[in-house]
Image: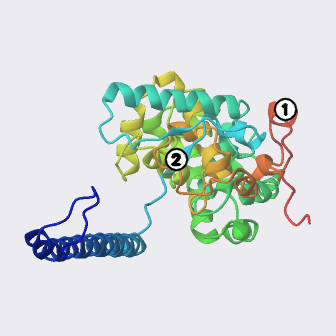
Amino acid sequence: MGEQSPDGGRKTAKQNKTEPVKKAASAKKAASKASASKASASKASGSKSSASKSSASKKAAKGAAVKKAPAAKKVAVAPKKATARLKGTAPAKAVVHPPGDESPTALVRRARRINRELAEVFPYAHPELDFENPFQLVVATVLSAQTTDLRVNQTTPSLFAKYPTPEDLAAANPEEVEEILRPCGFFRAKTKSVIGLSKALVEDFGGEVPGRLEDLVKLPGVGRKTAFVVLGNAFGRPGITVDTHFQRLVRRWRWTGESDPDKIEAAVGALFPKSDWTDLSHHVIWHGRRICHARKPACGACPIAPLCPAYGEGETDPEKAKKLLKYEKGGFPGQRLKPPQAYLDAGGTPAPPLGAG
């Protein structure tokens, strides 16, 4: 007897026969969909896991690359004015670019600006050898070779007290002069030079120091550097004094690449009017002795840091740089026992005599 259909009718035999087949097909189709869904989820999960692993791998590789890469060199940044840094104010950042492609006009402008800045810092700059007349200056300058001006200043009072004129020194006993000059080093050679130049002054120039370059360089022990010191400071005639400090700084500032003193003199002289030469020499030499030292420049205390292509070669920290300052800038006396009044008025201290302290 056939089953009763939901509508109250009876199912035929054919319907009874086909219904199980349809149910089986439907179940199989549902199972297939479930399997496909599971596979898709599994695939997505695998893909996500793979992506995660790939990302982690890339990060690890990137980390390794960063770790192996050398640290980038820190670019030295000069303050707008190093003197401002010493007062504790924040410096204005201004990277100093090496003037390798600097035009001649730009070089002249930069060089003259450096000189103006140094003139503000050292308005009382002067020759650091004690002297009262041209004779004392030429002798003191000859004695200053291979030693400090301070040592010369501590030695010459005894020398000039005993031999005040060229005639006195020309007739001196060499052994007695050697004993006085012993603290200056190379005392035998220097004794020969100062006695020789004294004799030349007496015999050729009537006991007077000549005021011309061509005459000065004929004196024993007197070269162009010594001659320009005498001309500029005893006669008021402009000259460039190319000593070791001057040579070091003008190359450090890239005013010239020359190493020969005569060529340095010519190259630097071309950057400035002749009337500036003597004071320029004082400014550069004073800066070299007090701040821009050969081994440890005090870059963090340098008033011309923004203009210097060598900024960063020395100590850039302001407080550490202050400890490197020498002479009156660091609270120490200068080189002269009898300095000019302007130096004393600016807070400079006279040097102690030989044997004091």
Marks 1 and 2, how far apart at CA:
25 Å
Is residue 163 visible to us here?
no
Q: Residue furthest right?
A: 357
Q: Position of residue 198 (x, y in %)?
A: 61, 50
Q: Residue at x 74, y 37 (%)?
A: 89
Q: Is residue 21 above or below residue 207?
A: below
The three-letter code of the residue at mark 1 reads Gln
Q: Is residue 351 above or below residue 111?
A: below
Q: Position of residue 142 (x, y in %)?
A: 59, 54
The three-letter code of the residue at mark 2 reads Phe
Report the residue marked by disc 1. Answer: 341
Q: Residue at x 60, y 70 (%)?
A: 186
Q: Is residue 337 left or right of residue 105?
A: right
Locate the N terminus and report the quarter of the image it occupies.
Answer: bottom left
Label 2 crowd (10 A; few <14 / some 14-19 / many >=20): many
Residue 115 occupies quadrant: top right
